[in-house]
Image (spheres, helix red, strand yellow):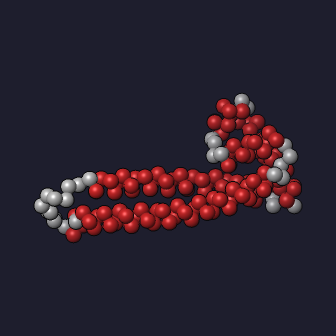
Amino acid sequence: MTEEEVRDFFEKLRSQRQEIYDLIQEREHVANDIAAVKAVQYDKPKITVTVNSDLSQVLEQIIERCDKLDKRLLECMDILTSMRKKAYELLALCRDTKAKTILYDRYLAGMSWREIEEKRGFTRQWLARMRDRAIRMISQNTS
């Protein structure tokens, strides 16, 4: 793999993690919507203003959205699992422990650069150099 391919792979891994996080957040909002609809008292007389005001229909639409999110979430998790497996294989090709740790923190643990700076006690510039060094080593060892 070229350095650019290695870098792109790790960035896609990070994006995949973010997509899953976003889906989980959306799923939680949908679950809250379901809870809100179910909390309505059904023993009161039904008032129908429009077709869409029927609570059972609204609930069905929310549940359908929830099912779609669950399906997409499972697909994304499968993709992330295979990407993580490949990421560990690539990390094994980096012999520099510090550089490997930077890649792990950023792309597998999902830490921000600021979090890594605080955890490791290094500047952002040094972290970028170590990341680039790790990517270069991985690229050289995959050729």
Kindly identify the residue that appears in the image at 74 percent across and 59 percent down.
Answer: 86
87 sits left or right of 31 in the view:
right
Q: State how many labels appear.
A: 0
Going by the picture, which residue comes out furthest to the bottom? 51
Position of 60 relative to 100 (above/below): below
The quarter of the rendered structure image containing the N terminus is: bottom right
Q: Is residue 56 left or right of residue 110?
A: left
Query: Quarter of the image containing the C terminus?
Result: bottom right
Between 105 and 132, the one nearer to me in the picture: 105
Please tell me which residue is depicted at 67% across the width and 49% down the height of the picture. Answer: 108
| Residue 110 in picture, x, y percent from top left | 63, 46
Q: What is the quadrant of residue 13 in the picture?
A: bottom right
- Quadrant of the image occupied by residue 63: bottom left
On the image, which quarter does residue 125 sit in? top right
Q: Whole-percent x and y of residue 27?
A: 44, 56
For residue 29, say whether it is visible. Answer: yes
Q: Is residue 142 left or right of residue 4?
A: right
Write the residue at 55% across / 55% down: 20
Residue 136 seen anywhere in this rendered image of the structure:
no
Q: Residue 81: percent from the left, percent from the top?
A: 65, 59
- Residue found farthest to the front: 43
Residue 121 coordinates in the image, percent (x, y) = 71, 30
Q: Residue at x 84, y 43 (%)?
A: 96
Q: Residue furthest left?
A: 45
